[in-house]
């Protein structure tokens, strides 16, 4: 038995008090055996004839096979986007563009259940999250940016905002539909066309969105979706696009930045994070515990802004830890489609191995692990919610993005020390502060090197609010008025 397994079994399970199964039906989803590329308004076969399987990570069952676009397909998609831009989209008045965005938003609402079930099947996330967070937020992004489409002159008074051209957009697997919405809605609202590359493991909701786009009768080629793996993403970055928008790992983000240097293509990067969630001794503890749990276990911790480093003020360390451990025992890990599930499947085997490696490094480096005893399904990719105490700042689990349900807990004495520890990371995407003093919230927020600082809450998103990073978490903002800017020439349309 490994050291990890031995230490995991120390805490007995809570007395059995089981929820009855409450599975959401899969019948609402109609899977095809095979999915093609969406280019120029049509579903077309890839030129190379290659397809990749896509699975349900909770069962490892193959759901479908999906086209793998090669460079030739990517070029066709970019040409379709360019033609659509010059012949149709660029010249359309903002109010007309808005009509299409409203149509997409309404269709997402009408088909919300279908999208939510498919998202959970393909990505492993709990249905209550895809149903209550991912899909409604995706729809609200389209609604929100539809509202800006005819008001760009007012958004940037005294300037002459106009579109850039064709955007190449590469998205990750943690919020597949939502990230597609974050990319497409501002690009289309501002008069650009797009070629979107979903992640290899989670292409299905983007392809369902392609159906919605067809039904909304967007001019052909305004949105193109090229599925595939890393090579497809690289081909898109290298293609004749005017702007690249990327969300994913810092490593690939740096690679893209190097590739684009000197090309004149515009670039925005939304990369990794290692957020500090800071709890002061005057915070309401039960509320803070809920925020900490939401901060790290939401979406299995596959969240770039996850509160993965908990900083606790020393006097409340023991009581907070006790409450946190008790709360962890009540988290239900299991079938993503069960409406009672809190923690679903890890998105892929590769991601599970990465989490296991970093957790093993935490144990090896001397941190103390805590995992509630809970049964994990026999098939699929799973990881128990995990806490580490006795973490020092130099530990890998305090430095590296784990992107899984793993929380590293550190302590601090003074606000100055909290700031120093919170900022001691190459990342700077988000942070959380828990205290009852408004003045302390402002004092902390001014000193956090983070794009977003949440106060007495965590992981709160709104399309009207800009989101993005400092330092190695990237640059450029998505959401809000600020999210329009990366898609605009502000001093004269091209
Ligand atoms: P990647 O950065 O590799 O993937 C993000 C997207 O970029 C995917 O669509 C991917 O395609 C594509 N891609 C991969 N390589 C290239 C390339 N050279 N040029 C252009 N596009 C490319 O993230 P991973 O999925 O590998 O995850 C690795 C780690 O990254 C995670 O463990 C996590 O720490 C972090 N991560 C952070 C995210 C965030 O939102 N900040 C999101 C996802 C991951 P494909 O998936 O098909 O390979």
Image (spheres, rainbow, N blue to C red):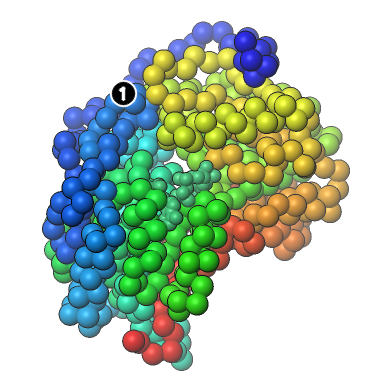
Whether 442 is drawn above or below 120: the answer is below
Whether 367 is drawn above or below 270: the answer is above
Q: How many residues crowd around disc 1 within 10 Å: few (fewer than 14), some, or many (20 or more)?
A: some
Residue 435, position as x, y percentages in the image: 72, 47
Numbered marks: total: 1
Whether 187 is drawn above or below 309: the answer is below
Q: Is residue 220 left or right of residue 138?
A: left
Whether 356 is drawn above or below 422: the answer is above
- Circle 1 is placed at which residue position? 23
Secondary structure type for disc 1: loop
Q: In which quarter of the image is residue 197?
A: bottom left
> At 13% across and 58% down in the image, what residue appears?
42
> At 52% across and 51% down in the image, what residue appears?
249
Residue 195, position as x, y percentages in the image: 30, 63
- Residue 100: in sight, yes or no? no
Q: In this view, does 45 lie to the left or right of 256?
A: left
Residue 121, position as x, y percentages in the image: 31, 33
The foreground one among 141 and 221 is 221
Q: Is residue 20 left or right of residue 400?
A: left
> At 58% across and 14% down in the image, what residue appears?
373
> At 35% across and 60% down in the image, what residue appears?
235
Residue 186, position as x, y percentages in the image: 37, 67
Quarter of the image with the C terminus in it: bottom left
Quarter of the image with the N terminus in it: top right
């Amino acid at each position: 038995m490994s050291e990890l397994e031995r230490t995991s079994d120390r805490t007995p399970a809570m007395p059995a008090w089981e929820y009855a199964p409450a599975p959401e039906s899969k019948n609402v989803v109609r899977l095809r055996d095979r999915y093609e590329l969406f280019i120029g308004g049509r579903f077309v076969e890839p030129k190379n004839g290659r397809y990749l399987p896509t699975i349900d990570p909770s069962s490892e069952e193959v759901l479908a096979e999906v086209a793998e676009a090669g460079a030739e397909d990517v070029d066709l998609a970019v040409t379709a986007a360019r033609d659509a831009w010059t012949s149709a989209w660029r010249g359309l008045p903002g109010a007309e563009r808005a009509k299409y965005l409203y149509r997409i938003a309404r269709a997402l609402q009408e088909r919300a259940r279908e999208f939510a079930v498919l998202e959970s099947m393909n990505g492993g996330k709990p249905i209550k999250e895809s149903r209550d967070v991912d899909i409604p937020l995706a729809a609200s992004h389209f609604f929100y940016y539809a509202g800006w489409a005819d008001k760009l002159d007012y958004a940037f008074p005294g300037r002459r905002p106009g579109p850039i051209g064709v955007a190449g957009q590469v998205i990750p697997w943690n919020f597949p539909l939502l990230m597609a919405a974050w990319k497409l809605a501002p690009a289309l609202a501002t008069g650009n066309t797009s070629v979107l590359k979903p992640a290899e493991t989670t292409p299905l909701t983007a392809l369902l969105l392609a159906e919605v786009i067809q039904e909304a009768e967007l001019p052909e080629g305004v949105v193109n979706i090229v599925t595939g793996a890393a090579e497809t993403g690289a081909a898109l970055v290298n293609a004749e696009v005017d702007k690249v928008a990327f969300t994913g790992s810092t490593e690939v983000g740096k690679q893209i930045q190097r590739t684009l240097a000197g090309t004149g293509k515009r670039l925005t990067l939304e990369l990794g994070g290692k957020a500090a969630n800071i709890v002061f001794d005057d915070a309401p503890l039960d509320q803070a515990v809920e925020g900490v749990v939401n901060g790290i276990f939401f979406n299995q911790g596959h969240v770039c802004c996850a509160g993965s480093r908990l900083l606790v003020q020393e006097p409340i360390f023991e009581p907070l830890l006790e409450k946190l451990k008790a709360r962890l025992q009540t988290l239900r890990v299991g079938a993503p489609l069960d409406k009672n599930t809190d923690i679903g499947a890890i998105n892929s085997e590769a991601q599970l191995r990465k989490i296991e490696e970093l957790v093993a490094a935490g144990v090896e480096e001397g941190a103390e692990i805590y995992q509630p005893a809970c049964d994990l399904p026999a098939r699929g990719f799973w990881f128990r919610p995990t806490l580490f105490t006795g973490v020092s700042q130099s530990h890998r689990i305090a430095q590296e993005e784990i992107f899984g349900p793993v929380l590293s807990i550190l302590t601090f004495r003074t606000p100055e020390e909290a700031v120093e520890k919170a900022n001691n990371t190459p990342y700077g995407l988000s942070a959380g502060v828990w205290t009852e003093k408004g003045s302390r919230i402002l004092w902390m927020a001014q000193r956090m090197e983070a794009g977003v600082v949440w106060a007495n809450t965590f992981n709160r998103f709104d399309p009207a609010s800009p989101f993005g990073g400092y330092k190695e978490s990237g640059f450029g903002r998505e959401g809000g008025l600020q999210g329009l800017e990366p898609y605009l020439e502000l001093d004269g349309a091209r």
